[in-house]
Image (cartoon, rainbow, N blue to C red):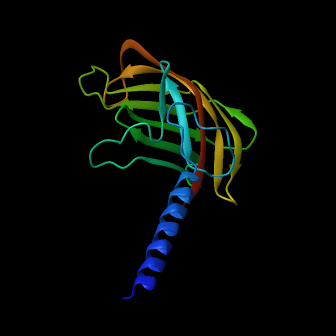
């Protein structure tokens, strides 16, 4: 390889490196210190406050062996929309809504939060037919569900039976998820 070819190759690689750095800096990064914005595009976002503490996707690496995952499924058979979030070491959250519809405030059938801190006496915190879910968009054609939620969950055992007076307060919840239709 002659000197001119080496110099051209070195210049090309330098320019390529600078372009890669520039393009990487333009990537949209999730803000892990605030709730995700309220969108209706199926962006797979989920967040809320649990007793004032932020619970969002990406805040922490997740449980060992468990990927961070958000899902929304609708079953024609049971007519239930189920929203699941396995987001970080703090725990997972699940919301079940019967007969979902857009632009509608609904009392959910069931909401529960499973903290992954197994030293607690509560296996989970459950809310039955309590709380609020507002479905801003329920679109089974374009497979998008988005909205807001809040609920108070009571300390319960692994069978979801109440075992004490301890409560968690889930507030300012929001989600925008790609929907999967079952059966």
Residue sitting at 65 percent across and 53 percent down?
144
Residue sitting at 44 percent across and 85 percent down?
5
Is residue 99 in view from this perspective? no
**Residue 28 picture location, percent across and down:** 58, 49
**Residue 165 picture location, percent across and down:** 39, 11
Is residue 107 in view from this perspective? yes
Q: Eyeballing the image, is 134 above or below 14?
A: above
Q: Quadrant of the N terminus?
A: bottom left
Taking depth in this image into account, of 88 and 93 the one nearest to the observer is: 88
Outermost residue toward the right in this view? 103
Examine the image and state in which quarter residue 140 appears. Answer: bottom right
Left or right of 40? Residue 65 is: left
Residue sitting at 52 percent across and 68 percent down?
15
Tell how many labels: 0
Taking depth in this image into account, of 139 and 46 the one nearest to the observer is: 46
Left or right of 131? Residue 1 is: left
Taking depth in this image into account, of 35 and 7 the one nearest to the observer is: 7
Outermost residue toward the bottom in this view? 1
**Residue 16 picture location, percent across and down:** 50, 69
Q: Eyeballing the image, is 144 above or below 117?
A: below
**Residue 22 picture location, percent across and down:** 56, 57
Q: Eyeballing the image, is 71 above or below 1?
A: above
Outermost residue toward the left in this view? 119
Q: Quadrant of the C terminus?
A: bottom right
Taking depth in this image into account, of 70 and 106 the one nearest to the observer is: 70
Residue sitting at 53 percent across and 45 percent down?
82
């Amino acid at each position: 390889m002659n000197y001119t070819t080496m110099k051209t190759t070195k210049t090309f690689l330098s320019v390529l490196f600078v372009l890669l750095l520039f393009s990487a800096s333009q990537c949209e990064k999730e803000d892990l210190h605030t709730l995700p914005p309220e969108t209706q595009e199926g962006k797979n976002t989920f967040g809320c406050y649990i007793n004032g503490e932020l619970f969002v996707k990406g805040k922490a690496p997740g449980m060992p062996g468990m990927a961070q995952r958000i899902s929304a499924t609708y079953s024609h058979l049971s007519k239930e929309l189920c929203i699941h979030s396995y987001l970080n070491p703090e725990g997972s959250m699940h919301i079940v809504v019967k007969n979902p519809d857009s632009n509608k405030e609904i009392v959910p059938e069931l909401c529960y939060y499973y903290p992954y801190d197994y030293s607690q006496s509560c296996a989970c915190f459950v809310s039955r037919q309590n709380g609020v879910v507002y479905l801003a968009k329920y679109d089974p054609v374009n497979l998008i569900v988005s909205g807001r939620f809040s609920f108070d969950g009571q300390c319960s055992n692994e069978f979801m039976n109440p075992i004490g007076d301890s409560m968690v307060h889930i507030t300012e919840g929001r989600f925008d998820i790609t929907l999967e239709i079952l059966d």
